Every structure is written in C-alpha cells, then in structure tokens.
Image (tube, rainbow, N blue to C red):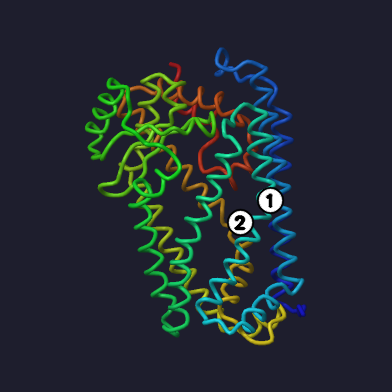
Amino acid sequence: MVQFNALLAAFLIVFLLRVLLREGLTLLNIRHLQRHGRRVPEMLHGEIDEGTLSRMTDYTVESSRLATLEEIAGDLLTLAVLFCGVLPWLTGALAGMQLPFVLSGLVFFGTLALAGGMFGLPFDLYRIFGIEKHYGFTTMTFRLWLADLLKNFAISTILMGLLGGAFLSLLHYAEKSWWIWSWLVFASFQLLMLWLYPVVIAPLFNRYEPIQDTDLKEAVMDLAIRAGLEISGIYQVDEGKRSRHTNAYFTGLGKTRRIVLYDTLLASSTQQEILSVLAHEIGHWKKRHILKQLIFMETASLGMFYLFSLLLDWPLLYATFGFPQPVTYAGLLLIGILTGPLFFFLSPLAAAVLRRFEREADDFSRAILGTSAPMVSALKRLARDNLSNLFPHPLYVAFHYSHPPLLERITRLMPRQP
C-alpha cells in the first residue's frame, strides 16, 4: 500500500506543476495561433494563400489537442501504475516464479514496455490515419503500418534486451561500481548505434539508393568538397510511401556517414533549395554540433547513472510505493518516474542551445552558398508543404522548439534593406 510522506508529496507537487505548465503552454500556443494565424505574413505573400494558412492553423490545433489527450492519458496511466500496487504485484509474481535476477528484471521491464506500447497504439493510429490522412500527408497503408510496428517491436526487443541484460548483470554482480560500468556500456552502445543505424537498421524500413539526378549529385559532392566534408555517399530514400512530409538529413559515423534526401523533397524542391538545406546540415557537422550534443548526452547520462546509484538502496523509495522489501530493478523504474518531471523544467536550457545551433547552421548555409535566397525559398516551401505553425507563442517555443520559428529564421536570413 502506498504511504503518504514527504517524498510522495514532493513528487506529486512537481508532477502536478509539470502537467499544469505543459498543458497551459499548449493552450496558450493554440489561442495565440487562433488569434494571429488567419492573416498571411507579408513575407509569404505569393507562397501561401489564406486557404493554406487556415489549413496550417487547423492542422496545428488538431495535432496539439491529440498530443494533449495522449499526454494526460499517459500521466493518468503513470499514476495508476504507482498508486494501484501494480509494481509490487508484478515483482511479487516474478519472485514466485523464482527466475534469475537478470531474467526477472527483463520480464519486468518488458511487460511494462509492452503494456505502454499497447496503450499508445490508438493515439498512433488516429494520428496517422486520422489527422495526417485528413490533411493529405499520410500515404501509408495499414499493412505497412503493421509491418513497421512489428519490425520496431522486434528490433527494440533485441536491442533493449541486450542493453537491459547488460545493465541488470552489472547491477547484480558489480555491486557498488555498477553505475560506472553501466555508463561505459551505454556510451559505447550509443556510438555503435550511430555507426550501425544507416547501414543495418534504417534499410529494414526503407529503400536507400544513390540519387538518380547526376547533376544534383555532382552539385552536392562539390558542396561537400568545398565544406571539407568527407561522406560515403548521397542517397535518396523512399519516404514518400509513408508520408508527403519533406526532409533531408545527415546520418552515420565515420565510414557510414552519409547524406540522405527524402524523395518527397527531391520531387518538390529546386536544386538550389536542396543544396541550401544540405548546406545547413553540413553546417551542423562543421560547427561540431553533433559532437557537442553527444558530449552533453554522455556527461548527462553519467550524472544520471551516479544519481541512480545513490538512490537505489534508499529504503524510503520502496516503502513509499508499497514494496515490502527493496527490489533493485523496480527501484530503477521508480527513480526514473520520480525524477522525470524535473527535466521538463530544464528543457528551456537545452532547447535554447539547440536553437542557437540551428542559427549557426543557417549562417553556414548562407556563407558557403554566398546567398541566403535559396534557404529562404526552401524554408517558405517547407512551411507550406509541412503545414508548419507560423505563429507559435514565445513561451511555447522556449520549452518545445529545437529550431527557431520559421518566420524568425526567414526574417533573419532575408537581406537587410539599405
């Protein structure tokens, strides 16, 4: 039975504040958009008409409301798991099976992950076949969606099973030093996935092939050479079989580093627009943004592992949530749930750094191409093609936006009038 004490009171206060602030920001963003999102900005005249702008507003509002519903449902599920005795019951049932520690932990996390995944399926289905289909984005069939789901399940089971098994083994056998060894495993796993993802995992979902447009290929290679960037190839991916959204990105590490272009981007954009988008992505590499993010992630994860090691043997942690005795693998989950809401309040710091990175990448694109015109044109096209929110509230941006708002980016890149 859950015991009400200072620990539980502190968690509930922070949890409730997170919910109120998060949903308050979403409501503020929706109202701000509905107030300002019916008049086409002067800089977008000729690119976006009032009908398209109205669809942009409606798409953002519907997507936000679904996200709010999913978030609140997830919060209620978390509270139900904590307060209804689910975790002590599950650990008790596993103890009765007399399974080895590592296997018990894997079954524990696997059961909860499976239940959480099933809980999220209705929201995923409505997002893809409801909202995305209504606004003309979804090209995915139910058969493809199911195939993706099963592939994701299989890959996640294998990878998380291996990683989780390693963590639990270290927790069980390495005693007090488990956290530092676990961090080393986690850091190595992240680097391995960066290297393997483009050549092993991504091709399980999409077909990657060298770009067919030889002129574009030569232009991209020339751009990479001018930037001093070595890449293993330039690929196009058949993302159009799932969605009409457009994108381009860098992926991989070392010899697997490559440029990937959505087929939807190739179909809708000019060569100069594509080059400006790729120059922006190259800018992230040249400015070492990827390395900086990786270092931050590894440092933060080291701190988290150490924090977990300090709290894992805390008797109050288990007594508060109805455990008759400590169960360390359940303790990992409890610590994660209790500390999770705190990170929401730190998100503006991380988001501000990421937005600064995006501005630096925009500047790099302008500098290497010698003009900002293609990037401005590309941003306008991306805004229209993806029905982006042109009028986000500044507070919502502060918490949620890893990129500056599109109008801010366009204004910043447009040549200044003398």
Q: Give the amino acid type for the residue marked by disc 1 in the picture.
A: Arg
Circle 1 residues within 10 Å: few <14, some 14–19, many ≥20 = some
In the foreground, 222 or 262: 262
Please tell me in which quadrant of the rendered image residue 137 appears.
top right
The residue lying at 36 percent from left, 30 percent from top is 365
Tell me residue 174's x, y (percent). Answer: 41, 83
The residue lying at 38 percent from left, 75 percent from top is 181
Q: Classify 410 as above or below 306.
A: above
Tell me residue 300's x, y (percent). Answer: 46, 63
Q: Where does label 2 land, which residue?
A: 344
The residue lying at 61 percent from left, 56 percent from top is 344
Q: Give the amino acid type for the residue marked by disc 2 in the picture.
A: Phe
Report helix, strand or loop for mark 1.
helix
Task: Indicate left or right for 321 with 354 as reference.
Answer: right
Q: Where does label 1 land, which residue?
A: 22
Q: Classify 270 as above or below 250.
A: above
In the foreground, 243 or 144: 144
Please identify the quadrant where the C terminus is shown: top left
Q: Are marks 2 and 1 in contact (CB under 8 Å)?
A: yes
Mark closer to the chain start, 2 or 1:
1
Task: Indicate left or right for 127 with 5 as reference.
Answer: left
Q: Which mark is residue 109?
A: none
Report helix, strand or loop for mark 2.
helix
